[in-house]
Amino acid sequence: MARYDVIVLGGGAAGLFCAATAGQRGRRVLVLEHNDRVGKKITISGGGRCNFTNIHASPENYLSSNPDFCRSALARYAPSDFLALVESRGIPWHEKKLGQLFCNTRSQDIITLLLDECARAGVTIRCGTKVGEIQKADHFRVGTDGGDLSAEALVVATGGLSFAKLGASDLGYRIARQFGLRLTAIRPGLVPLTFSGADRETFGPLSGVSLPVRIRHGGAVFEESMLVTHRGFSGPAILQISNYWKEGQTLSIDLLPAGGPDPAPGRGTAVAQLCHVWPKRFAEVWCARYTPDKPVAQWTAREREEAQRRLHAWPVDFSGTEGYPKAEVTLGGVDTRDLSSKTMEARRVPGLYFIGEVVDVTGWLGGYNFQWAWASARAAGQAV
Ligand SMILES: Cc1cc2nc3c(=O)[nH]c(=O)nc-3n(C[C@H](O)[C@H](O)[C@H](O)COP(=O)(O)OP(=O)(O)OC[C@H]3O[C@@H](n4cnc5c(N)ncnc54)[C@H](O)[C@@H]3O)c2cc1C
């Protein structure tokens, strides 16, 4: 049976970075990936340009049952550390907005970087491998369709359930359960929300229209754009707030985040006034539904008040989310109470580590999730 110091399950962002870190410390490392190639999610990330970190990443940008858990790993491997690695490879990058760093050309640059780091560290990578039963005696024994393997340490980096077509599986959660670790409830995150009731008929035809909004919900506030789709609302503001939204809750959307123009007398119809700040089609449909059908000068004080209230706090209900197939991340996962925040090792199972998205740590949209992948991978890679 082939023996390694470390077996990493999952050749995604966290798995590859952990393997390289451990390999560079002289550990004999094997990565097992069931896809035909590693890093498929990295390839499509950031619209093909991988938003590989966020220079403002801090614990406040993450959701977890224990918001302090991510603190140590993030402090020890900062966005500037990953950026230094990117720059050392001469990979061209730019800041798009809000501290979000993207590759100038393509995500493949990041995959090549990770593969080079692994090669330099003598890491073996096996793609197209089916992982079967896992046992632990002295060592971990990993059954695969290519035979049994053994290792002192097992790192689970199999990610969450989103985007199953890219290879997502529940293996990480099953391993956690097998070894007695607790799991927190999981659900799709950074995901479009779907219309309820008549909203689909009213707003669905506006698919493609986007406008700036501010949404405050569950203690978070995001001021970004919202995109109308055939099935609901998406765009950065909605994806961000979806992490905080739960089924049955109403969102209150400020449609004029920059202030005016609140409909005022003497300036024609509400549509005429609002189409200066909104796409015309949205102004027409929204005003037809919510404002009196007469010039603003003829509105009563009450009608004006009502319109202003709705413009700044438009209550919207949703039937649900687009689910894992469209979710960028999975919220929840391996309960951090059962992991060391310094090393990511399971507290009661020496040698077993969980890193990246499989752990109950989820970042905002904008490079935060990759930063968690790098930081948690680094913490484990230095400990295994
Ligand atoms: C469309 C999209 C765009 C995104 N864009 C960004 C972005 O620009 N910036 C950002 O910060 N985050 C982004 N994310 C989120 C980010 O991709 C993830 O948070 C990150 O990849 C998590 O890293 P990970 O290594 O934990 O998991 P993954 O990258 O998902 O890697 C897990 C690996 O394990 C493998 N695996 C799973 N099950 C098994 C099994 N049973 N046997 C063997 N191997 C297995 C998978 O095939 C995969 O290769 C995006 C996500 C999506 C879906």
Image (cartoon, rainbow, N blue to C red):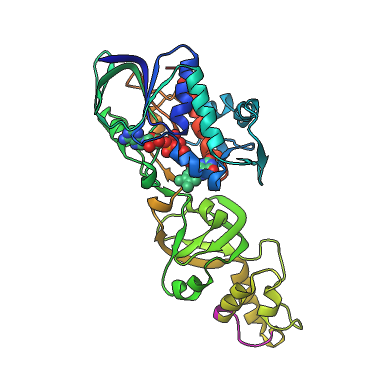
Q: What is the tally of numbered marks visible in this picture?
A: 0
Please name the residue shown 43% across and 13% down the image.
Answer: 27
Q: Nearer the viewer, residue 307 or 189?
A: 189
**What residue occupies the far right of the structure in this picture?**
266
* The N terminus: image quadrant: top left
Q: Which picture quadrant has residue 91?
A: top right
83 horizontally vs 349: left or right = right
Please name the residue shown 64% across and 70% down the image.
Answer: 279
Which contiguous range is marked in magenta?
289-295
Where is 371 relative to 331, above or below? above
Q: Position of residue 18 (x, y in %)?
A: 46, 24
Where is 49 relative to 6, above or below? below
Q: Position of residue 246 (x, y in %)?
A: 42, 55
Q: Please tell me whether the stretch drawn in magenta is mainly helix, strand or loop.
A: loop
Please name the residue shown 71% across and 72% down the image.
Answer: 276
Please name the residue shown 55% across and 62% down the image.
Answer: 227
Say if residue 30 shows up in the picture: yes
Magenta-colored stretch includes residue 291: yes
Say if residue 375 shows up in the picture: no
Please state the quadrant of the image where ligand 1 appears: top left
Q: Position of residue 77 (x, y in %)?
A: 57, 26
Q: Nearer the viewer, residue 347 or 280?
A: 280
* The C terminus: image quadrant: top left
Q: Position of residue 11 (x, y in %)?
A: 41, 31
Q: Nearer the viewer, residue 378 or 240?
A: 378
Where is 258 relative to 334, above or below? below
Magenta-colored stretch includes residue 222: no
Where is 269 relative to 72, above or below? below
377 horizontally vs 275: left or right = left
Q: Which picture quadrant has residue 79?
A: top right
